[in-house]
Amino acid sequence: KANMIIPQIAENLTRSGLMDIPCRCPACGGSTEIRSANDVEALYCVNPACPAKAIKSFDLFVSRDAMN
């Protein structure tokens, strides 16, 4: 789904804008970890009670046909 729904950066040609990977979630302050799936690495909050994860889960629920 890269570049279809979710934008993907293939290469940083100018080598500018380098950033450190955050070790804390900006929403809840919990720890973060990098998870790999299907040759894609993503940063995740490991706190199951993270409010940002709860909002995203609720958003996904109401956007599908799961709720009438």
Image (cartoon, helix red, strand yellow):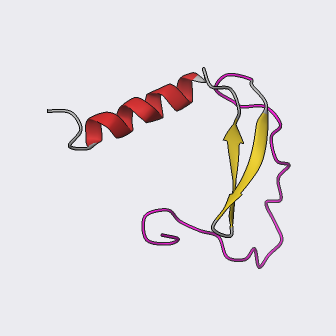
The residue shown at (33%, 35%) is: 61
Residue 45 shown left or right of residue 52 in the figure: right
The residue shown at (82%, 47%) is: 21
Residue 25 shown left or right of residue 21 in the figure: left
Q: Which residues are magenta?
A: 1-29
Within the image, what quadrant is residue 28 found in? top right
Within the image, what quadrant is residue 58 found in? top left
* Camera-nearest residue between 1 and 67: 67
Tell me where residue 6 appears, x and y as whole percent: 49, 62
Q: Is residue 9 magenta?
A: yes
* Camera-nearest residue between 40 and 15: 40
The residue shown at (74%, 23%) is: 29
Tell me where residue 37 appears, x and y as whole percent: 65, 61
Residue 7 position (above or below residue 59): below
Q: Is residue 49 magenta?
A: no
Tell me where residue 27 appears, x and y as whole percent: 64, 26
